[in-house]
Amino acid sequence: MFKTNEYFDGKVKSIAFETAEGAATIGVMAKGEYEFGTSTVEYMTVTSGVMTVQLPGETEWKDYKEFETFIVDKDVKFKVKVNGDTSYRCLYK
């Protein structure tokens, strides 16, 4: 069955499920700035809105728009800023 997750005082929520490619979550972030840690490689695809992302080891921030994907390595932290409700799919590998 599905598992729900809530982070940052409810400003980030997701539902975990299994896909043909493996474990995944579908989620929504409210306007704000967040820092996430990874335990696997994560393939993050923006499904609505824009995410501004600072990947580990980078000094620049990059915008990812609808249907664009970025990859985050295992066991690192990355930062995300969103200016309004933004949805995503995260595939864990």
Image: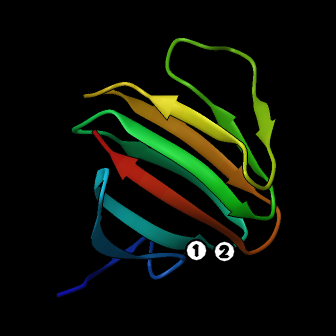
According to the image, what is the colour scheme of the structure?
A: rainbow
Tag 2–tag 1 contact (CB < 8 Å)? yes
Left or right of residue 32: residue 20: left
The residue that label 2 is drawn on is 30
**Mark 2 neighbour density, 10 Å: few (under 14) some (14–19) many (20 or more):** some
Instruction: Name the residue rendered at 30%, 72% in the picture.
Output: 16
The front one of 37 and 26 is: 26
Image quadrant of residue 31?
A: bottom right
Residue 2 circle label = none
**Is 75 rendered above or below residue 22?**
above
Identify the mark at residue 28; answer none if there is no mark. Answer: 1
Q: Decide: is 24 above or below 36.
A: below
Query: In front of the other: label 2 or label 1?
Result: 1
Secondary structure under the numbered disc 1 in the rendered image: strand
Q: Position of residue 82 (x, y in %)?
A: 74, 58
Name which residue lies at 59% across and 62% down. 88
Residue 19 drawn above or below residue 74: below
Q: What element carries label 2?
A: loop
Most extreme residue toward the bottom, as rendered? 1
Q: Residue reaching furthest front?
A: 20
Q: Where is residue 25 in the image (x, y as percent from the top left)?
A: 39, 66
Real-space Cα separation, disc 2 to disc 1, in angstroms? 7 Å
